[in-house]
Image (cartoon, helix red, strand yellow):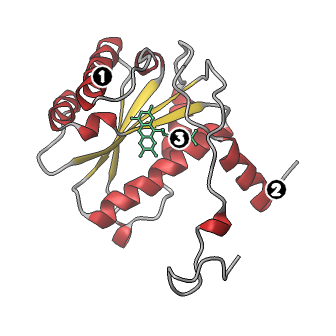
Amino acid sequence: MKTGYPALYSLMRSRQSVRKFREKKLTKGQIEKVINAAVTAPSSLNSQPWKFVVLQDAAQKKGLRGVYTAARVKLGLYAQDTSFVEKATPIVVVCEDSDFGKMTSCAMAIQNMFLAAQSMGLASLPSVTILMDRESEKLLGEMIGLSARQKIVLVTFFGYADEKPQRKPKKNAKSLVFGNSLKNLGKIL
Ligand SMILES: Cc1cc2nc3c(=O)[nH]c(=O)nc-3n(C[C@H](O)[C@H](O)[C@H](O)COP(=O)(O)O)c2cc1C
């Protein structure tokens, strides 16, 4: 069994975005583990500015699917089977305000959620689509009782994979790391 960095790296590499989920709910224990992982994240001034809205109600998930599907059409994104929205467990990550440090902190918490899910054999998907369209973002905000100060960071989905997507190619670290200046590519690795 791999331990230390090899184990963590292998877990990170194994995560991939899934857009087809089986109709199987997460248990309370699984949700708790995902959120427990999120709240270990660092945060600016230890603000811990995050809140997590778990959507379990079928009617609410149907509503979320409607908002997501409509947003994709409005944004002119490629056609997608959006049934996963209702099959997975959506968790909306909310920040206490839109301060850059706090939003970044929430992003760090979110990655912890994905890795925790992966370690439990669960599939996941981050989704920004709804937040790319003002009206759709507003509708989601109303759905979850968002206050004027709060900001939705991301919609995340968790559940059981019903597909094995092709792995997305990832850039090699060597092409992305610079020595001292962005003009000195490849001097470090
Ligand atoms: C911030 C963020 C927002 C994303 N939003 C969407 C989305 O709205 N819909 C979708 O199908 N995938 C979304 N994705 C998934 C990306 O398409 C995916 O991460 C990327 O293609 C790389 O694939 P991988 O996650 O399997 O490594 C999002 C990913 C991130 C990080």
Is residue 115 visible to us here?
yes
Q: Earlier in the sequence, mark 2 or mark 3?
A: 2
Residue 142: image quadrant is top left
Is residue 48 visible to us here?
no
Residue at mark 1? 64
User: As shown in the figure, which amino acid type bears the numbered disc 1?
Assistant: Leu
Percent position (x, y) of residue 55? 36, 25
Q: Circle 3 — which element?
A: helix
Give me the C-alpha separation between circle 1 and circle 3.
21 Å
Q: Which image quadrant: the C terminus?
A: bottom right
Residue 83 vertical placement versus 117 (above, below): above
Q: What residue is at 46 percent from the left and 57 percent from the top?
A: 108
Side (left or right) of 63 relative to 14? left
Give me the C-alpha separation between circle 2 and circle 1.
39 Å
Count residues near mark 1 (Cα–Cα under 10 Å), then give few for <14, some for 14-19, many for 20+: many
Give me the C-alpha separation between circle 2 and circle 3.
21 Å
Percent position (x, y) of residue 138? 15, 35
Q: Earlier in the sequence, mark 2 or mark 1?
A: 2
On residue 34, the disc is: 3
Q: Circle 2 — which element?
A: loop
Residue 169 vertical placement versus 45 (above, below): above
On residue 3, the disc is: 2
Percent position (x, y) of residue 66? 27, 17
Residue 177 vertical placement versus 184 (above, below): above
Q: What residue is at 14 percent from the left and 51 percent from the top?
A: 149
User: As shown in the figure, which amino acid type bears the numbered disc 3?
Assistant: Val
